[in-house]
Image (cartoon, rainbow, N blue to C red):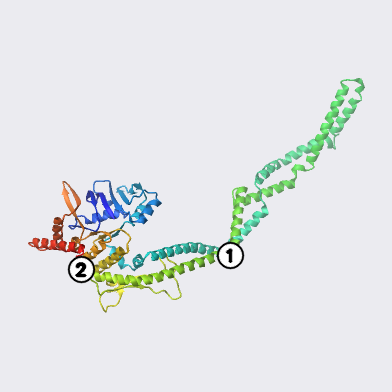
């Protein structure tokens, strides 16, 4: 339950600390005093919408902090443990908003995201606002109300259906995409096949382009080189119009060699001529090889040019250079192989698709059976609660929408059922949807009946009712007040009300007052004593001028009756 709440700079509240105890707390006050501000502060600290209009005029930020006793709430303990937050049985929630839009949340003093604060708050307090009864007018919300009344096994089944549905939907998205790709694969495979054939035939190699480019550069000067080689070769060894140089050198060597007997320098010169002859002879052999074709083969030059043209054409189609072309070739091969095995993939995923759908349908049927049994119990309990609230002749029914013959819905996280609440407020009247026949007062009592069932079931320790008594007056106000007392026996209850009958039933009555201090208006909230409660309940009773004492006497009587009821007398 909530132990205390500190409100700072929220609307007309400058600074306010409220302490709470067990039982029923009632918040009352004149219209416009600021009762809704207290509820706005509660909603803010529980993770509700952060409206900057809530920040007090003249200030830049506002905050609310609430402290809860959660010692008997194991779900909260587990949540704190998951976040490694020290937990001693109490939980503090802090929410700060600023005019700049900054939003700060703390749980037990630790800065946490808003989502975690809200997740924690959902386990600690349930707020029923003035307009929440309108959810009963929306059949789409009725399934949630029904499921909330189910026991632990029903909640587990809900979770199992949700998990099974999520698994099926994940598979369904993948399966649908795979089937579509499989239908379109023929054209893509043909394209890939042609590209792969072209690349496989080319047999590109890393570094090949650079090597061929260098070879081409040499071929660019081939004619100049060839002319020089042939001229040199002809001069040394193969001249037709002039005597070859080699022959002349050899002739010179032999002539000098004939003078060896005469001594130097003839023998030395003869030896040098022989050496020159052998060197020139070697040069002539190499020039002869070059002149006969060798490195300067025109056919090789043409092959190099053709190969480079192919490489550059493939690079324009498949990548910036050979490494990238080869990488893309590998990817295309993998894609082609994947398409080639896609029929098998489709078959495997199709089998899994059927298995997951069957698993979901089986659980969904169990959930439907559980809901149908739960609906009968829920109907009986609701009619009992409504009888307590002055609607004894009302027939309440949970109606299951029929399913189209031979056609099943797409799996839903909540199962295959669509339900709506119907009532017949008066004997002999046909069952009709709530939205068509329920009045404001009936909606308030229907919602109160549902909340009463929730309180009996257990769960959240604190329930907040913001003017749930809308549309209720007279004798029915007393009935609703007694129902509030019944709920408060098992839960801490906070109720904002304008009905004196409910105010009289409170264990703790808080008065909201608006006061002008200097040039500022402030809203204050204070706990009333017994005497002050008599005055406040008398004010709520109203009455003509001159009947003040009668109102006070009536108020005192209401408080006395309430005390006896609370004591079980």
Q: Distance between the residues labelled 1 and 2?
A: 70 Å
Quadrant (top left, top right, bottom left, bottom right) of the C terminus: bottom left
| Left or right, residue 280 beside residue 76 | right
Which residue is depicted at the point 73% across and 41% down? 223
Quadrant (top left, top right, bottom left, bottom right) of the N terminus: bottom left
Task: Give the x, y percent position of residue 268.
Answer: 86, 23
Give the residue at the far bottom of this rendering: 428
Image quarter of residue 512: bottom left
Q: Is residue 455 visible?
A: yes
Who is closer to the viewer here, 369 or 247? 369
Image quarter of residue 233: top right
Q: Is residue 402 above or below residue 181?
A: below
| Left or right, residue 132 beside residue 516 | right
Label 1 with label 2: CB-CB less than 8 Å: no
Dot 2: element: helix
Residue tagged 2 = 476
Q: Is residue 435 visible?
A: no
Identify the mark nearer the N-term, 1 or 2: 1
Task: Give the x, y percent position of residue 379.
Answer: 32, 72
At label 1, counting other C-alpha atoms closer than 10 Å, the crowd grade (few under 14, some 14-19, many 20 or more) is: some
Residue tagged 1 = 343
At label 2, counting other C-alpha atoms closer than 10 Å, the crowd grade (few under 14, some 14-19, many 20 or more) is: some
């Amino acid at each position: 339950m909530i132990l205390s709440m500190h409100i700072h700079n929220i609307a007309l509240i400058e600074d306010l600390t409220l302490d709470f105890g067990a039982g029923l707390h009632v918040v009352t006050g004149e219209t416009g005093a600021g009762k809704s501000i207290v509820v706005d502060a509660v909603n803010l600290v529980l993770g509700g919408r952060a409206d900057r209009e809530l920040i007090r005029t003249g200030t830049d930020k506002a905050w609310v902090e609430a402290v809860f006793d959660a010692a008997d709430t194991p779900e909260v303990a587990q949540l704190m443990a998951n976040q490694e937050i020290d937990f001693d049985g109490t939980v503090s929630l802090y929410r700060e908003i600023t005019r700049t839009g900054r939003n700060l949340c703390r749980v037990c003093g630790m800065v946490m995201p808003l989502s975690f604060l809200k997740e924690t708050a959902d386990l600690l307090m349930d707020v029923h606002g003035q307009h929440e009864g309108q959810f009963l007018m929306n059949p789409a919300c009725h399934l949630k109300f029904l499921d909330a009344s189910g026991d632990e096994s029903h909640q587990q089944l809900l979770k199992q259906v949700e998990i099974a549905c999520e698994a099926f939907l994940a598979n369904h998205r993948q399966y649908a995409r795979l089937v579509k790709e499989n239908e379109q694969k023929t054209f893509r495979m043909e394209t890939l096949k042609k590209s792969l054939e072209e690349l496989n035939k080319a047999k590109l190699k890393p570094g090949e382009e650079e090597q061929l480019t260098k070879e081409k550069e040499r071929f660019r000067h081939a004619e100049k080189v060839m002319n020089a080689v042939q001229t040199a070769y002809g001069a040394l060894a193969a001249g037709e119009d002039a005597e070859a140089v080699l022959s002349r050198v050899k002739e010179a060597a032999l002539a000098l060699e004939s003078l060896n007997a005469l001594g130097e320098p003839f023998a030395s010169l003869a030896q040098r001529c022989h050496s020159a002859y052998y060197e020139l002879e070697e040069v002539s052999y190499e020039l002869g090889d070059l002149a006969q074709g060798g490195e300067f083969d025109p056919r090789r030059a043409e092959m190099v040019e053709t190969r480079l043209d192919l490489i550059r054409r493939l690079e324009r189609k498949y990548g910036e250079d050979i490494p990238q072309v080869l990488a893309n070739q590998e990817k295309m091969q993998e894609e082609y192989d994947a398409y080639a095995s896609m029929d098998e993939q489709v078959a495997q995923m199709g089998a899994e698709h059927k298995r997951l759908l069957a698993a979901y349908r089986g659980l969904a049927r169990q959930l439907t059976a559980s809901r149908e049994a739960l609906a009968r119990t829920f109907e009986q309990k609701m009619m009992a609660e409504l009888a307590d609230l002055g609607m004894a002749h009302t027939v309440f029914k949970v109606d299951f929408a029929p399913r189209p013959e031979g056609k099943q819905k797409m799996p839903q996280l909540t199962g295959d059922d669509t339900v709506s609440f119907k009532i017949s407020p008066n004997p002999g009247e046909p069952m009709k949807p709530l939205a068509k026949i329920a009045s404001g007062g009936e909606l308030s009592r229907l919602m109160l009946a549902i909340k009463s069932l929730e309180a009996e079931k257990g769960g959240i320790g604190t329930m907040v009712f913001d003017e749930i008594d809308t549309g209720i007056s007279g004798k029915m106000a007393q009935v609703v007040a007694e129902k509030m007392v019944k709920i408060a026996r098992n839960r801490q209850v906070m109720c904002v009300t304008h009905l004196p009958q409910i105010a009289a039933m409170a264990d703790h009555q808080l008065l909201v007052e608006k006061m002008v201090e200097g040039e500022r208006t402030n809203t204050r909230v204070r706990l009333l004593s017994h005497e002050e409660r008599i005055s406040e309940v008398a004010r709520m009773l109203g009455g003509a001028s001159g009947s003040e004492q009668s109102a006070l006497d009536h108020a005192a009587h209401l408080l006395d009756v309430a005390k006896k009821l609370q004591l079980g007398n």
